[in-house]
């Protein structure tokens, strides 16, 4: 099972998922609005490497980082955690809360309906 990324790690992973690989400098530049220091980003990427969330390519002068966990894998890991910890394993409670939290577009509702119909058919 892949580790559950922290909020800070998810911010970095979102950058990597958009366009890999990235150097520490590139990640730092994209997070400048957050006023995060370069060394903080470097340390965070080192921790993420130890956790198995990213890999480092050392073949060039500036090391590049790639994600080792897909966005879908991260979503599943986070969702499993929320499902177990917040909703006591109840998928229906999670689903109902998600649907009632914010209005859904007609397109989203149609997509949900189609998914449920496909699940019923097996």
Image (tube, helix red, strand yellow):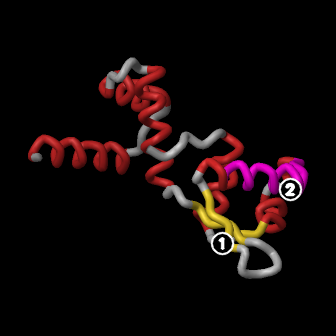
Q: Nearer the viewer, mark 2 or mark 1?
A: 1
- Residue sitting at x 67%, y 60%: 15
In this image, 14 relative to 74: left or right? right
Q: Secondary structure at mark 1?
A: loop
Report which quarter residue 92 is drawn in: top left
In this image, 98 relative to 36: left or right? left
Report the label total: 2
Which numbered marker is on residue 52? none
Which numbered marker is on residue 21? 1
**Looking at the image, is 79 positioned above or below residue 27?**
above
Q: Where does residue 16 sit, x and y in percent of width and height?
A: 64, 63
Extent of the magenta region? 35-48
- Dot 2 and dot 1 residues touching (CB under 8 Å): no
How far apart, in angstroms, are the residues tagged by discs 2 and 1? 18 Å
Query: Which one is in front, 108 or 71?
Result: 71
Which numbered marker is on residue 32? 2
- Residue sitting at x 76%, y 69%: 23
Within 10 Å of disc 1 (Cα), the crowding (few <14, some 14-19, many 20+) is some
Which residue of the protein is positioned furthest toward the top in this rendering?
A: 88
- Residue sitting at x 40%, y 31%: 99
Query: Which one is in front, 102 or 63?
Result: 63
Query: Which one is in front, 92 or 38?
Result: 38
Q: Quadrant of the N terminus?
A: top left
Q: Main secondary structure of the magenta part?
A: helix
Q: Where does residue 97 sit, x and y in percent of width and height?
A: 42, 25
In this image, 113 relative to 121: left or right? right
**Looking at the image, is 97 positioned above or below residue 27?**
above
Q: Where does residue 7 sit, x and y in percent of width and height?
A: 66, 40
- Residue sitting at x 50%, y 48%: 74
């Amino acid at each position: 099972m892949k580790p559950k990324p922290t909020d800070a790690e998810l911010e970095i992973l979102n950058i990597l998922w958009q366009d890999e690989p990235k150097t520490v400098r590139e990640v730092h530049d994209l997070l400048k609005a957050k006023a995060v220091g370069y060394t903080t980003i470097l340390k965070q990427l080192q921790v993420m490497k130890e956790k198995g969330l990213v890999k480092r390519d050392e073949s060039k002068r500036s090391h590049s980082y790639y994600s080792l966990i897909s966005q879908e894998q991260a979503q599943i890991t986070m969702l499993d955690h929320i499902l177990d910890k917040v909703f006591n394993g109840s998928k229906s409670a999670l689903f109902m809360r998600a649907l009632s939290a914010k209005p859904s577009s007609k397109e989203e509702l149609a997509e949900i309906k189609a998914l449920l119909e496909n699940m019923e058919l097996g």
